[in-house]
Image: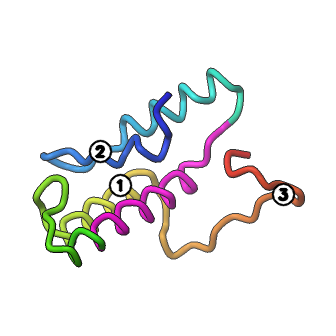
Amino acid sequence: MICPHQAVHCSSKHRPSVELLIAVIRHYQQLTGRQLSAERVMAWHLRTALGDALWRSEAGIPLADHRTPPDWVDDLAARFSMLGIDPKAPPPHPPMGNTRPDE
């Protein structure tokens, strides 16, 4: 099964998209009865994408799609916007005793 955070990791050459992420989240809920948090998925995606851009830039290796790090940041910002996620909002606090990232 595809990891939910990977659903948006492969960026479109034309424009950012979130359709695959939304489909994966819905399918995961249908299979498991549990809701994934788009905010948590995108937080993991942000960490992964920026980490990839950083090490590639420092090593002089082109990004996977041969665009620039600022292009990646712009795409990430667009995806957050499409999902209605405000990057300036404080993260929601999980209920007491919740230690699993998908709960």
Callout 1 touching callout 2 (CB < 8 Å): yes
Where residue 21 appears, as percent x and y from the top left, is 43, 39
Horizontally, residue 95 falls left or right of residue 90, namely right
> What amino acid is at disc 2?
Ser
Q: Which residue is mark 2?
A: 17
Residue sitting nearer the eye, 59 or 78: 59
Q: CA distance from mark 1 to mark 2?
A: 7 Å
Say which element carries label 2: loop
Spatial CA distance of label 2 from label 3 is 31 Å
Find the magenta span and give its range: 35-54
Tell which of 32 and 48 is nearer to you: 48
How many marks are shown on the rendered structure? 3
Q: Give the residue number, with chain letter if any, for mark 3.
A: 95
Say few, some or many: other residues with alpha carbon within 10 Å of mark 2 (under 14 / 14 to 19 / 20 or more). some
Where residue 1 sits in the image (x, y, percent)?
50, 27
The answer to whether the residue labelled 3 contacts the one labelled 1, judged by CB atoms less than 8 Å apart, is no
Q: Is-magenta flag for residue 53? A: yes
Q: Position of residue 9 (x, y in %)?
A: 34, 49
Q: Which residue is mark 1?
A: 79
